[in-house]
Image: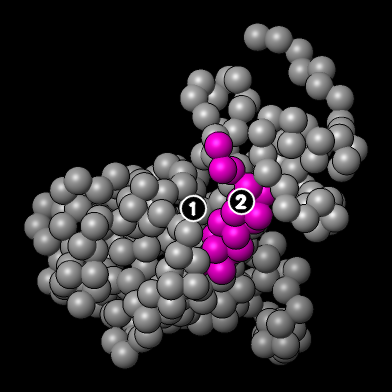
């Protein structure tokens, strides 16, 4: 290993380096503005596929342009906005279902009971985290409850509106009650292990979108679990699709969105986005199969 010693470059030096390496820049002033407001490092993820082999030479392929890289960035940004909108609906639905099922089976404070969870250490950390988030909350319902009741914790239908989706996903995974977990999972047309895997993927995707990380053209951190048997609703053939690809993740979001809102327009929005950015290679960059629209999920 070695010590990193590269000095920071001015915006002009960054642009000069790109041009020196063979990148065509049509509008110098606009390129400088984008480097200033987006950062060289963020844009580098969209420039990297344009670098010729061997990558270590840092030379751009013939015909590579700064403007095309920015278009890809814009596509990725709009795609993440679309995914965020659909994930929000899935998140709200899951909050409602886990609260309803467990509250009716036990009571309003089920999430505080040690006996309902597999790992007591995970449960204690979860409870501490819930208490901290509720204590810091400025939601009117949380403030009024604390003013009127002596309970240490809020009822689940209040508390679980405040905790993060990541917290909620871990809470579900740690539950002992397999029948309650199965009831929730089956409402989405999958079994418990698949829902646990998908919740992890959804929270990860949500974080990518929230932190403005790159979703396009990358192998994502979590792999979609294999089905022991196919879902009961329309799905896709994943035989030759990487299980940690953008396409795999988008299919999960589409499947769950269909359960939450059967009359959704997600497919049309995806098609409109692809039509707007026809320079995007959705097959190589996102692992979309050639005939993806003919899959049952997308019909």
Q: Are marks 2 and 1 in contact (CB under 8 Å)?
A: no
Residue visible at 69% across and 30% down? 21
Q: Left of 239 or right of it: where is 92? A: right
- The quadrant in which residue 291 appears is bottom left
Residue in view at x 81 percent, y 35 percent? 16
Q: Nearer the viewer, residue 50 or 269?
A: 50
Q: Which circle's residue, 2 or 1, is located before the other in the chain?
A: 2
Task: Identify the residue under disc 1.
Answer: 216
Residue 209 is drawn in which quadrant?
bottom right
Tell me residue 163's x, y (percent): 58, 68
**71 magenta-colored:** yes
Estimate the x, y position of residue 142 in percent, counting from the top left.
68, 82
CA neighbours of label 2 inside 10 A, class few (<14), some (14 to 19), many (20+): some
What residue span does the magenta drawing correspond to?
62-80
Mark 2 sits on what residue? Answer: 69
Q: Secondary structure at mark 1?
A: loop
Residue 9 occupies which quadrant of the picture? top right
The answer to whether residue 126 is magenta is no
Residue 205 picture location, percent across and down: 48, 58
Q: Position of residue 139 (x, y in %)?
A: 71, 82
Of all residues, the one furthest to the top in this rendering is 1
Q: Considering only vertical position in the picture, is 142 above or below 64?
A: below
Q: Residue at horizontal 60%, vertical 20%?
A: 57
Q: Nearer the viewer, mark 2 or mark 1?
A: 2
Q: Circle 1: is it few (<14), some (14-19), or many (20+) Cα within 10 Å? A: many
In the displayed structure, does residue 279 sit left or right of residue 77? Answer: left
Circle 2 SS class: helix
Q: CA distance from mark 2 to mark 1?
A: 12 Å
- Given residues 175 and 268, the one toward you in this image is 268
- The colouring scheme, among rainbow, by chain, secondary structure or one colour, is one colour
């Amino acid at each position: 290993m070695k010590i990193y010693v590269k000095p920071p470059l001015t915006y002009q030096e960054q642009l000069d380096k790109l041009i020196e390496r063979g990148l065509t820049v049509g509008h110098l002033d606009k390129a400088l503005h984008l480097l200033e407001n987006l950062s060289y490092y963020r844009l580098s993820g969209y420039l990297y596929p344009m670098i010729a082999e061997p990558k270590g030479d840092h030379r751009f392929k013939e015909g590579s342009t700064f403007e095309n890289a920015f278009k890809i960035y814009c596509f990725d940004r709009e795609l993440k906005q679309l995914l965020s909108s659909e994930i929000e609906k899935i998140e709200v639905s899951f909050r409602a279902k886990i609260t309803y099922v467990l509250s009716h089976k036990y009571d309003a404070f089920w999430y505080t009971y040690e006996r309902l969870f597999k790992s007591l250490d995970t449960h204690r950390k979860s409870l501490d985290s819930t208490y901290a988030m509720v204590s810091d909350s400025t939601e009117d319902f949380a403030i009024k409850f604390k003013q009127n009741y002596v309970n240490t914790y809020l009822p689940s239908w209040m508390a679980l509106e405040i905790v993060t989706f990541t917290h909620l996903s871990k809470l579900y995974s740690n539950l002992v009650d397999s029948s309650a977990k199965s009831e929730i999972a089956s409402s989405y047309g999958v079994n418990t292990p698949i829902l646990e895997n998908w919740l992890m993927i959804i929270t990860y995707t949500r974080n990518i979108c929230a932190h403005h990380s790159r979703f396009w053209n990358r192998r994502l951190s979590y792999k979609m679990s294999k089905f022991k048997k196919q879902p009961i609703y329309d799905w896709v053939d994943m035989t030759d699709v990487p299980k940690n690809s953008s396409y795999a993740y988008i299919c999960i979001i589409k499947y769950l969105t269909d359960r939450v809102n059967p009359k959704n327009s997600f497919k049309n929005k995806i098609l409109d986005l692809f039509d707007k950015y026809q320079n995007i290679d959705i097959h190589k960059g996102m692992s979309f199969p050639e005939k993806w629209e003919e899959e049952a999920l997308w019909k």
